[in-house]
Amino acid sequence: MAEHFSAENRWWKWSDYVVKRGFICPAPGAKLISYDVWNLYRAKGRRGSSKRSPPYGDLIRLSNHIHFPRKMMTCEQESLILQWCRRFGLLGLLTEALVEVWLPQSTARDSLFRGERGHVHHERVARGWRSGFQVGPLPARIRNPKAILLRDGKPIEWTLGDLLATYFPSIQKAKRARFRMPMPLSDSFWAIYCEPVDSFVLRAKELSRAVEGIGQVRADPALAYSGMELLNGLTKHVRPLLVRERNSRWGQTWVAPSLISVFSMMAMLDCLKGRRTIRCQRCGMTITTSNPTTLYCGNTCRWAGQKRQQRGQPVAGESKLGRPATVTAGGTA
Ligand SMILES: [Zn+2]
């Protein structure tokens, strides 16, 4: 019997994380929390407020402060990553690309097929994941148990050994062949899923390059074009979904397979609304604003920044980040 799992608008985070052998993993005793990720975006976009710090802004700021690769990172930088993960969770690097998994032959555990031999099959569907048990041999198109991922729109195949070694480091090599991978995004999946620190940082930097590139649409059109291509790539697995609302009305929501694709979609929506993404010139916080003259995240930073400028001192945010903070989304500055 197939088990369905709807993931629209939700993401998961552990209350605590640790870095173990180069992987970001749930900390022992941590609690799994599910939250509405779009709620963060809606809450930050209240009417009447021209400035806001978007949920993806913290990731951009984090990626700008982290060295790559991990051997160049300081302990402080590593703990900043863990701090971020405690707030938002992992990026979903595997679930973003994964579309199908066929597990090795096993005996069915559910009541319908109990005792039968066959294969557990996980498949990404419109709203989340579907997991089923196929009695008998693998289908003709699938010769061996494997994972199928999408890379640049094309399906590529991974052995289960590669999949487990890349994202499930707690599963020992000897046990990988018989391991029953849980359905993606289920509680038991999150209990063992980890992300390599380097892949996490690389993906975060990609979003940062996309948003900052788009911001240079007037100053550097070629850079803006590559930012646009990057953002289009980061959002390619996000799709709109028609949903029924109260009073028989229809509404629209988004379904995305990973946190990085949700954040990228938020950046794209801000860009389409003509909002500029900037770094506060004093504290470096990433904010979006519809005001073309905004330089600071709020009054405190504005007053402090103006005071420093009057005294002829450099603005703190500029010296800390090494460059001025002007990133424009949508070319409306
Ligand atoms: Zn500020």
Image (cartoon, rainbow, N blue to C red):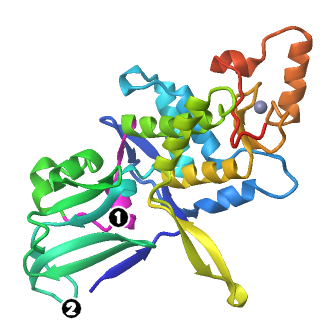
**Residue 61 visible in rendering:** no
CB contact under 8 Å: marks 2 and 1? no
Residue tagged by mark 2?
112
Name the amino acid, label 2.
Leu
| Element under disc 1 | loop
Tell me how many marks there are: 2
In the rendering, which numbered label is found on residue 184?
1
Image x and y of residue 168, in percent: 27, 51
In the rendering, which numbered label is found on residue 255?
none
| Quadrant showing the C terminus | top right
Residue 48 painted magenta = no
Q: Is mark 1 within 8 Å of ligand 1?
A: no
User: In the drawing, does residue 220 fall left or right of residue 162?
Assistant: right
Number of other residues with Cα within 10 Å of mark 2, as a class: few under 14, some 14 to 19, many 20 or more:
few
Find residue 187 and report its image quarter.
bottom left
Q: Is residue 102 above or below residue 165?
A: below
Magenta-colored span? 180-197
Image x and y of residue 239, in percent: 51, 65
Q: Nearer the viewer, residue 264 or 313?
A: 264
Q: Give the CA separation, mark 2 to mark 1.
A: 22 Å
Q: Is mark 2 within 8 Å of ligand 1?
A: no
Image quadrant of ligand 1? Answer: top right
Q: Residue at x 70, y 34 (%)?
A: 285
